[in-house]
Image (cartoon, rainbow, N blue to C red):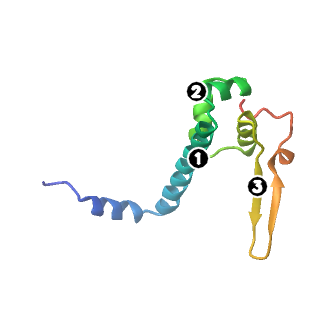
Amino acid sequence: MAGHKSWNANTTSILARPGARQRIDEYKRAIELATELAEVREQLGITQVQVATKLKTSQPNVSRIEHVDDLHLSTLVQYVKALGGRLRLEMVFPAQTFELDAEDMVPATRNALA
């Protein structure tokens, strides 16, 4: 067909653009995080409505949290707490690993869902 490019030609053209690979990788990480958040919630047998009730927000806001591409740490801390958990972070370096309690890093008065 005239005027149509093959899939490979389109892909090559897109990836040749400056920063394209980085943006694609960022989107992939965001999709993976959203999938993981929803999967954890579902494995715990908790609905978005139940999370929304605990967070004093709406179910659509919980869905946005699960699908946002750049989640604030404070929002993630509140989300995990609503699931009944506690968020811990690791900073991994070649010689050692540091564990952080994310709740200690987020001011208690901050409303991450505002």
Q: Are marks 3 and 2 in contact (CB under 8 Å)?
A: no
Decide: few, some or many residues near mark 1? Use Cα within 10 Å; few <14, some 14-19, many ≥20. Answer: few
- Name the residue carrying label 3: 89
Residue 102 has which mark? none
Total label count? Answer: 3
**Residue 103 occupies which quadrant of the picture?**
top right
Mark 3: which amino acid?
Leu
Q: Is 6 on the left or on the right of 68, as rendered?
A: left
Residue depicted at x 52% and y 51%: 27
SS type, badge 2? helix
Q: Is 1 on the left or on the right of 88, as rendered?
A: left
- Closer to the chain start, of discs 1 and 3, is 1
SS type, badge 3? strand
Q: Position of residue 101 (x, y in %)?
A: 83, 51
Mark 1–mark 2 distance (CA, rounded to whole Å): 18 Å
- Work out which quarter of the rendered image holds the C terminus and state it: top right
Residue 36 has which mark? 1
**73 vs 36, nearest the viewer:** 36
Q: Position of residue 78 (x, y in %)?
A: 75, 37
Residue depicted at x 59% and y 48%: 33
Mark 3–mark 2 distance (CA, rounded to whole Å): 27 Å
Kindly report which numbered mark, 1 or 2, lies closer to the viewer in this rendering: 1
